[in-house]
Image (spheres, rainbow, N blue to C red):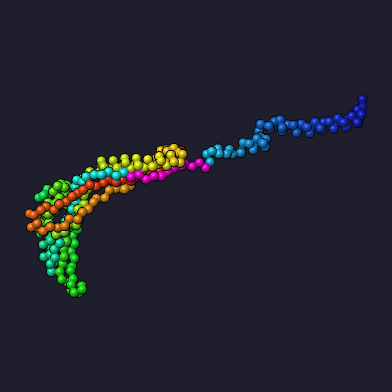
Amino acid sequence: MAVPRRTLALAAIMLALGATLGALVSPLAGGASERPAPAALAAATTPVAAPAAAAGATTRTVSVAGEGRVTVAYDLATVTFGVETSDAELAPAQAENARRTAALLDRLKALGIAEKDLQTVGYNVSPQYGDNGARLTGYRVVNGVRATVRDLGRLGATIDAAVAAGANRVHGIGFDLSNKEDATRRAREAAVADARGKAEQYARLTGLQLGAPVTIVEGGGDAPKYREAAPRAAGAMADAVTPIEPGQGAVTLTVQIVYELR
């Protein structure tokens, strides 16, 4: 039986539409898990911003200086003696200087000063000129000896004996401590307490709380006192002993501390 031409044409159109729809649906159904949607891809690659509270955070601090001062009694002294000689010729000037310096050292040792407490601190030879520097007149020789005296009660007598033995210069007396460790520890404790007291006051005045120290820098130190002792003539020793008063000194220490404020 013959099929009408209109029926065949309609069937061909339906087959073509079916093939087209199949081609469109197949990629969507089979590749959904392999290719993410544009919106999903954008969400996966967007960076996450840091919390606003952590950005630009700063630490508040206060820097203060503290000083600790401890009064001490000196228990030793250093004295610098000088022997100066001069002569028209160099050799006699040196020989006389050597003799008198040796006598000075022997006398100091006889007084109980140990060799470790005796030190040469200078030896100088210089020509002397007259007529406004046009004519050589002789030579001057100077030898310096520093002695550490550990018995302050005998300091005056030691100076007199050194002058009698040949020293004709006494440059000065420096008082010091044989052991500074205890005084230094006490000065450090006082300095830190002073600094913390200042920092606590600043925190209170500004309505904040004092935190832990951030940095600590120590500085400062004590300086020995010096008193001049005038040389005495050898014959004057029988009259009186040179009076020397060591007085009191101080060990001073400073600290610079930075504290955190909360």
Residue 21 location, x and y as percent?
78, 32
On screen, residue 46 versus residue 256, left or right, reads right
Q: Residue at x 18, y 74 (%)?
A: 131
Magenta part, dominant SS: strand
Residue 124 location, x and y as percent?
19, 62
Q: Nearer the viewer, residue 115 or 211?
A: 211
Query: Which segment is the magenta one?
Result: 56-67
Q: Nearer the viewer, residue 199 or 170?
A: 199
> In this rendering, is residue 205 above or below 173?
above
Question: Among all residues in the image, which is located at the extreme top?
Answer: 1
Q: Nearer the viewer, residue 2 or 22?
A: 22
Residue 116 location, x and y as percent?
17, 49
Tell me if residue 108 can be seen: no
Q: Residue at x 44, y 37 (%)?
A: 209
Placement of the N terminus among the 4 image quadrants: top right
On screen, residue 197 versus residue 130, left or right, reads right
On screen, residue 10 versus residue 116, left or right, reads right
> In this rendering, is residue 197 above or below 19?
below
Q: Residue at x 21, y 49 (%)?
A: 175
Q: Residue at x 11, y 49 (%)?
A: 111
Within the magenta stretch, is there residue 177?
no
The quadrant in which residue 9 appears is top right
Q: Nearer the viewer, residue 256 or 36?
A: 256
The quadrant in which residue 203 appears is top left
On screen, residue 47 versus residue 240, left or right, reads right
Within the magenta stretch, is there residue 60?
yes
